[in-house]
Structure formats: structure tokens, C-alpha cells
Image (spheres, helix red, strand yellow):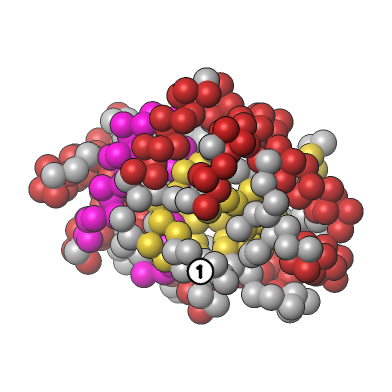
Amino acid sequence: MKYLKLGNLNEPVSAIGVGCMRIAGMSSGQLDRYVHTALDQGINFFDHADIYASGKSEEIFGDLLSREPSLRNRVILQSKCAIHDSMYDFSKDYILSSVDGILKRLKVSHLDSLLLHRPDALMEPDEVEEAFQILKKSGKVLNFGVSNMNRYQMEFLGDRLSDSLAVNQLQMSAAHTPLIDAGINVNMMTDAAVMRDGGTLEYCRMKDMVVQAWSPLQKGFFGGTFIGSEDYKELNGVLDALAEQYGVTSDAIAYAWLLRYPAKMQVIIGTTNPDRLKHAAKAAEVELTRSEWYQVYRAAGNQLP
């Protein structure tokens, strides 16, 4: 397993992280096997959000930690807050109350990382800073980050924060590459050249932030997986060929493609299948060549200028 440094954590975090959005329906036995399988593969990072199954995902994970307290020292816990009642809310009171709820459901004293879940158009950075400082001084949260924010939103918020943002969680996959396209197509008269995010990936690299890629197998916005999709025959052909070459599965190559990008990349996988966790872990052992990376990029339907 590859590991990277996230913020001020002493414990390195695995380059493959487990997204816990879909675990709410698991039995206690299934969840126990699932978490231990991840840990056995060197995966120590678990990503939650207070809206996942209306808090149920955190609750059953907390039940596991309650049954086996020693697990807390083996896992890195991240959760997200801000989405409720069909809106986004970065208000101080809501952030503070959300974290209290998260900690209660997870049955832990602190989070290793807290992300603001999607940008709030009504964000008041000074108010966010107040909430973050209260959480930091109380020991409830060790690191802070954001999700789905562009460069200028991060700069605007970060200008008021005492501590640097440690993470930006962004949708990214071989079939969803707008974060990459504009940088390749600078000054071209094509749709791919449209700079929609202001150079978010480059900004994260400059600020030494971890980039967490969510929906790493998705086409579009929850449009289904591209693995085996008839819409992506060429891409799947390339992934299958590389998978055979490296002795892994095609989904592992899709994850390895993300990890090859030269930022502090972390792939957040959403599977609830323990065997697929094992496949995903193999991605950290694959180092695609520059040629192979571009081969995957082109096979997904992207043209180089």
C-alpha cells in the first residue's frame, strides 16, 4: 500500500480510502469483515458524511468501534458536514452541532479530518474560522478540508483560516476529467479548453493538499460505472490490456490511473464488496508509465491538441 501525509496527522493515510456511503445496510458481521479486510490490505482511511443514510452509516460504524475499541487506533476517520434540508450550510452553529452529532454516532472523541461538504454560496469565512478554532481547541477535529471547491473558493476561505486546508475531495475518474482537460487544452477553441475550476488541481498541488478522488469509476454525475460499459468500449479495452499486463483487475488500473497524477492523490472507493477492496489495494502497487496514462486518457474519448 502507498501512504501519504494528511495535514498534521502523525499516522500516514493509505492512498486508497474507503467511502462509507453505502454501508448502512450491512449486518454487524458483514461490516466487521469489511473493515478488517480493508485493514489487512493496508487501507486505514474511512470517509463518512453526516448525510450518508441520514447518519445510519456513521451509527453502524460507531457500533463496530464500540464493540472493538482497539480499532480506533488503527483507523483514520474523516466525515463531512454542511448538507441539510436541500441546502448547504457553513454557519458556525451548524458546523459545531453537526460535529457533535457525528462524534456521537461514531462513538469517538475526535475526527482526524472534517470536510465541508460542497460549497455554500452564503459562506462567511470568518464564521467558518470561528467554528474550526472551537473544534480544534476542544480536540474534536484535528484537520479541516473541503469538498468540490474550486481554487478561488479555497483561496477566499483559506485567507481567513488560521490553519491550512488539508484536503479537497473532488469527483474525478478516467471518464470524468474536466479538472484535467482545461490544462491540456489551454488557448484552444474547444469545449475542453473551458476553464471551469480555475486550476483547482494545480492549486491543491501548490498548497500540498490531499486530493481525494470520489466516484473513481463513474461516468458523469452518478451515471453508472464505465467498467464494462458499452459506452466506453475503447477505454475498457485499454484497461483490460493493462490489467493483464500488470496482473491486476481493470478497476485497479482505473484507480492506478488516478494515483499516477503527480499530486497527493487519494482514491475514495465506494464498494461494499470485501473482495473488491482487495482488488483496489493492488492499484497502489501499479505505477503506470506516462505513455500508459495518456493512453487511458485518450481511450476515454479525450483528444490531445
Q: How many marks?
A: 1
Q: Position of residue 229 (x, y in %)?
A: 32, 30
Q: Position of residue 68 (x, y in %)?
A: 54, 37
In the rendered image, the residue lying farthest to the right is 93
Left or right: 305 as drawn, with respect to 193: left
Left or right: 193 as drawn, with respect to 152: left
Amino acid at circle 1: Asn
Is 305 a magenta residue? no
Report the magenta residues as a range: 262-288
Q: Residue at x 33, y 34 (%)?
A: 276
- Which quadrant, please, contains the N terminus? bottom left
Q: Quadrant of residue 52?
A: top right
Is 276 a magenta residue? yes
Q: Residue at x 75, y 75 (%)?
A: 161
Left or right: 132 as drawn, with respect to 180: right
Which residue has dot 1 on it? Answer: 10
Q: Residue at x 48, y 51 (%)?
A: 74
